[in-house]
Amino acid sequence: MKRALHDHYYILPYSYSKTLKLFRKFTFNGEKYGYFYHEYNEAWGNERSVEIPIIKKYVDEYDCDEILEVGNVLSHYFKTCHDVVDKYEKVDGVINQDVVDYNPKKRYRLIVTISTLEHVGWDEEPQDPEKVFLALDNLKNCLAPGGKLIVTIPIGGNPHLDNFLKTGKINFTENYYLKRISQSNRWVELGSDFIEASYGSPYPLANALFVGIYEK
């Protein structure tokens, strides 16, 4: 079997998982979604398999110039045409700017960020766990009236952010939690209450995922 990103884990081979794609679905917000399968970053065997279809559904509903993505994720899986802000990834078409400093002339109808906010202020020097509040405030300011901000956050990756979610210090118009329940990467939605989970145990990478939707 192919090794997972963590040396002590194994995940299902891509070819086998791709076959399962014909039969497997997960539920989010009352709708059925097909799991996402891609070889990049072993996306068939971790949280990307549910994050990508959820976010892509929203992205497909808007024009390119109406969308901002924070953290360059989607372009690794399919062709994109929207604005992308990523402080670190230096590739053509990506705006290398800190999310708290980004101040565009236009406002966006949709802003998405996939497993990125848990790094803001946490995987930086010096650490500033509350920087995420500045990031969220700035992203909300970047929204057009009626615009939506949609974020996914893996639980267990940043203990401070987990606590902000658990205590309601970070709250969205809509709050959803999904949990991984099998080695074969099956996920179930468990409602709007915070889920305690460890990152990397018992399964590789995220074992629970927060999805927040804010509407301006």
Image: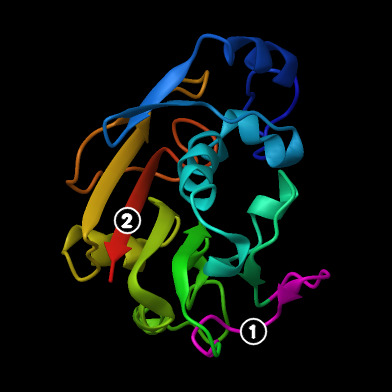
Q: Amino acid at mark 2?
A: Gly
Return the residue found at the far right: 92
Q: Label 2, on which residue? A: 212
- Magenta region, residue range: 88-103
User: 214 or 16: nearer the eye?
Assistant: 214
Residue at left 45%, top 36%? 201
Q: Residues within 10 Å of mark 1 (few under 14, many from 20)?
A: some
Asked whether residue 181 appears in the rendered view, the answer is no
Q: Amino acid at mark 1?
A: Gln
User: 187 or 63: nearer the eye?
Assistant: 63
Screen quadrant of the N terminus:
top right
Tell me, yes or no, whether the highlighted magenta stretch contains residue 141: no
132 is higher (above) or lower (below) than 39: below
Label for residue 138?
none
Q: Main secondary structure of the magenta part?
A: loop
Position in image of residue 68 (x %, y %) = 55, 68
Cβ atoms under marks 1 and 2 closer than 8 Å: no
Horizontal arrangement in the rendering, residue 158 relative to residue 92 (left or right): left
Screen quadrant of the C terminus:
bottom left
Residue at left 64%, top 52%? 74
Position in image of residue 142 (x %, y %) = 44, 81
Asked whether residue 45 appears in the rendered view, the answer is yes
Label for residue 97?
1
52 is higher (above) or lower (below) than 93: above
Indicate how the structure is coloured in the image: rainbow
Image quarter for residue 22? Answer: top right
